[in-house]
Image: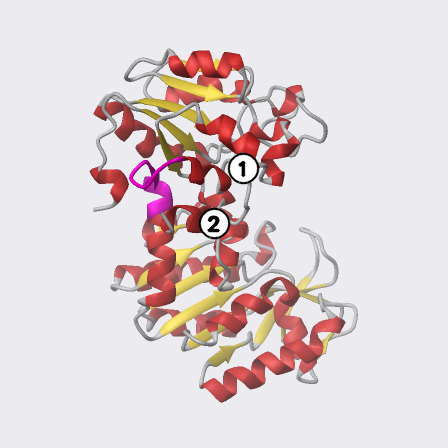
Amino acid sequence: MSQFSNHDFKGQRALIRVDFNVPLDKKTFAITDDNRMRAAVPTIEKILADGGSVILMSHLGRPKEGPEEKYSLKHIISHLSQLLGGVTVKFADDCIGQSAIDLSAGLLPGEVLLLENLRFYKQEEKGDVGFAEQLSKLGDVYVNDAFGTAHRAHASTAVIAQFFEAGKKMFGLLMNGEVASAEKIMHESEKPFTAIIGGAKVSDKILIIENLLERATDIIIGGGMAYTFMKAQGGHIGNSLCEDDRLDTAVTLLKKAEAKGVVIHLPSDSIVADKFAADANTSTAPSNSIPDGWMGLDVGPNACEQFANVIKRSKTILWNGPMGVFEMEKFQHGTKTIAIAVAEATQGGAFSLVGGGDSVAAVNQFGFADKVSYVSTGGGAMLEYFEGKVLPGIAAIKEA
């Protein structure tokens, strides 16, 4: 059992850092995707059920200079109340200062207070100690449940922890789940361990691939980044996406993998198109001989079969990044095939973690989110964790 699950919050005010940075409709301010809010509900409900009260702090968007109407957290109050089964959500029109102090001090057991956007203050992102101390005065216990911001050393995600003694700072249920799943992949992975890495750019994924070479048995590479590897090996890739300044990097990664006995799987064939558009003419071509004027926008049928076979015999699976431009129907087959194979392997006993915005969007779109072991909410944070970096939001509590 985690420290959070064992803690009795009766009569305590829990100051929770949540990630309510949800997309809002530009005109109506209606929430267009509430997944991040839903993810925090179990943590909030446990505290309320214990007889504690809850003070929620979050950022929303990227306000430039102080308060902006479109980034006010007041827009999410009614939906948050709905998610919590009708509990009235009080709102402080500032995250520090007298009104926030008075409202938090007056909270009764079972009550919820939402603070205004933390990023209306520059001190939040600067990790200002004085700002963190002011926030800390609003609660008796600090709970970090915002994995999506764990890689930032901000005032509310890392710096604030120093103002709470051991036993009064902890991860929430979401954060516990994220950390446990990530650690299972990195430190307790059963072999064969397959990492599926997609997306547009090799440069975004170099560190994660290097770190996984120490752990994985197989690495599947798809998406636009695959063509940089193809060209690096002397292939002809037509108009496909390529980072010419990363060709040497690709060769180095392939050599390192070979030296460590890690098999890198590149797509043998591709679905190619004559333009980057939903109504493009399409064809199939070997990934290393794509005609001039054509570009690879998805992995081909042979690659799909090859990749699915590797995945189905795996015991541990990490998936980060799509295989093609899955937002367009003509180029979603590769990503969908991966989703199906990961789901089947999971059903057969494998542990699977899906993370990174596009892969998460894909498993949700294709209806496989509940058929994998864990879907991570933190794109950038998860990527940095698998690159082997220390995440300040995790370290601040683990070192307690």
Residue found 48% across the figure and 64% down from its top? 388
Q: Is residue 202 above or below residue 288?
A: above
Q: Which amino acid lies under the numbered mark 2 shown in the image of this protein?
A: Val
Of residues 99 and 40, the one drawn nearer to the viewer in this rendering: 99
Where does residue 232 sit, x and y in percent of width and height? 68, 80
Q: Which amino acid lies under the numbered mark 1 shown in the image of this protein?
A: Ala
Q: Which of marks 1 and 2 is in front?
A: 1
Of residues 343 and 207, the one drawn nearer to the viewer in this rendering: 207
User: Which corner quadrant of the image does residue 281 belong to?
Assistant: bottom right
Residue found 36% across the figure and 63% down from its top? 185
Residue found 36% across the figure and 60% down from its top? 183
Give the magenta-colored segment's residue range: 164-176
Horizontal placement of 183 versus 91: left or right?
A: left
> Do the numbered discs 1 and 2 sit on residues whose CB atoms are within 8 Å?
no
Q: Mark 1 points at which residue?
A: 155
Q: In this view, does 59 lie above or below 72?
A: below
Cα separation, mark 1 vs mark 2, equals: 28 Å
Q: Mark 2 points at which residue?
A: 360
Q: Number of labelled discs?
A: 2
In the image as oriented, which residue stretches furthest toward the right? 293
Secondary element type, mark 2: helix
Secondary element type, mark 1: loop
Q: Earlier in the sequence, mark 1 or mark 2?
A: 1
Horizontal placement of 235 versus 46: left or right?
A: right
Of residues 76 and 328, the one drawn nearer to the viewer in this rendering: 76
Where does residue 221 sit, x and y in percent of width and height? 54, 70
